[in-house]
Amino acid sequence: MSLRKKDFTKTIRLKLFVGTYNVNGKSPTTSLSDWLSCDDESPDMYAIGFQELCLSKEAYVFMDTPKEEEWLRTVLRGIHPKAKYRKVKLIRLVGIMLIVLVQERFAAYIRGVSAETVGTGFLGKMGNKGGVGVRFELHSTSVCIVNCHLAAHIKECERRNQDYHDIYLNYRLTGIEGLAAKTLLDTANYKDLIMFDQLREQQRIKRAFYGYQEGILNFQPTYKYDTGTDNWDSSEKNRAPAWTNRFLWKADDVDQIVYRSHPSLRISDHKPVSSLFEISIAAIDIVKYKKIYEEVMKHLDRLENDYLPQIAVSRTEIDFGTVRFLENKSNFLTISNTGHVPLQYKFINKLREESYSKPWLIVEPHTGFLMAGDYTEIQLEIYVDKRTAGKLSTGQDTLQDILVLHLEGCKDLFISVIRSYEPSCFGSSIGALVRLQQPIRDYSAEEVLILEKRHYHGEVDDWHENNRKSILAVPKEMWFLLDELSKRGTEKENLFELLGLGAEISVIRDILDTSMPDNLPGSIHSVGEALLVFLDALPEPVIPVRMYAEAMEASATYLSPWE
């Protein structure tokens, strides 16, 4: 049916209004109609994104804020009066909110609505930075809209790139001073100013948003203004103006009609931006669909009598070599349809197992359709994180897996996945680490596994019981991290609030696994995050679960020595 889709579908063109506004924690004080209903004709759909909706600390803890209802009411009062709309979805992550509306006449054709949030703030999880997304089917076309709020400040370009990869705008002007930028803007010289735009540069070198399109920026930068005015930032920081509120898209048959800002709204230190798109939606003609469906089924019945599916795989054993904690490793498997009929393939669950693969293995795509003579490449990715490292270290999980490739109308195939996990202090238990006098890589995997099994099963280690002086008070790796933080981090602002860089954390991990360092490399934020990752990856918390009740009982008297 997919090959004959054009025979039973028709294309309709709809207008999509997309808006974005960083409100800097402010409440709505005026109508939004100058922004949301500035066109003569009503749009068919709205996608309205907000950033920094709420800046209170309570919103980070309780995930609730009255600002959500305030801005939703103001939006519904400000949308185009010539049409009636229904809410498809509202999704919010702290101060990042996305509202999707559709005209009532299209509501019956909306299905499969889903939403997701990704936090990239503190610890890579907090919602002060990140993204929210809404996906749905309109007729038979899939639509996905994402609202992102990435890391701030000119120097954080690399952090914004990392946030993009985690979510998948907020880029600045770099290489130009604030006064020079404002001079160019006095003459509306946007073309020369765009040469300093970080986003365009990162797209050009394929570091972020490669393959996405953006319209021509022919309006004033939307940041930073003195709140309540149209004047550029006059504070001591004197920030250079920048286009920090942007729209990018990746799709066929999309035309951007207009791309503009709305300077008349002065609620925030940003100006809202909007764009009107014309998009193509494939709608199914039910009468034609039924007729073609009958034709296809009759044709398939004839083929079933004459042909059987045949398939070939490039290999049945995949060796990933050595895998380390928090390091991705990928491999590829080619599946070819060598028969004369189309076939459906799928990796299925093994008997009495809940998933087709172990949690450290991802297969994409895990299901698909191949025409006769076609082939596809399957990516297999291994990633050991805090969820899986502990079980590997303690021997509760094996280093192998068998994938079952199921084919409709044909026998199943079995793909063996083998690998060698290199033990790391990250993911190892405290009970094992305090018994290691040297870096963990100085010991064989078997020696580490024996220690972990003894600790996990509560077995007494006779040698160490007779030589308690050789048992460390705390894991040396934890001491090295805390020592580095005490030397460089005691006076550091925002420690544990800013993310470290993944590459630096990997280097710190390798140094702790292979040496007894005097100092640790990388920024102090990377060292701080490495400590948090180390603690988070422990198979058992620093205070064992079995001691929680005793600890809670003792906590009631913790002040007694000072009373």
Image (cartoon, rainbow, N blue to C red):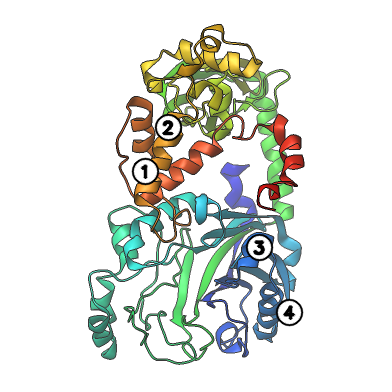
Q: CA distance from mark 4 to mark 3?
A: 21 Å
In the structure shown, which secondary structural element does the residue marked by tag 2 occupy?
helix
Q: Which residue is at the front of the view, 431 or 314?
A: 431
Q: Point out the tag, 1 or 2, that comes first from the N-terminus.
A: 2
- Kindly report the distance in space between the C-alpha atoms of the residues bearing marks 4 and 2: 62 Å
Front position among marks 4 and 2: 2
The relative height of residue 551 versus residue 123 in the rendered view (above or below) is above
Say if residue 531 shows up in the picture: yes
Q: Which residue is mark 3?
A: 91
Which element is circle 1 on?
helix
Q: CA distance from mark 2 to mark 3?
A: 41 Å
Q: Three-letter amino acid code at disc 2?
A: Glu
**Tag 4: amino acid:** Lys
Q: Nearer the N terminus, badge 1 or badge 4?
A: 4
Query: How many angstroms separate mark 1 from mark 2 (CA)?
Result: 11 Å
Horizontal side, residue 104 vs residue 423: left or right:
right
Report the residue marked by disc 1: 484
Q: Which residue is mark 4?
A: 84
Q: Which residue is mark 2?
A: 477
Q: CA distance from mark 1 to mark 3?
A: 40 Å
- From this view, report whether residue 40 is shown above or below residue 479: below
Disc 4, SS: loop
Nearer the observer, disc 4 or disc 3?
3
Viewer-proximal residue among 530 and 337: 530
How far apart marks 1 and 4 lie (CA) works out to 60 Å
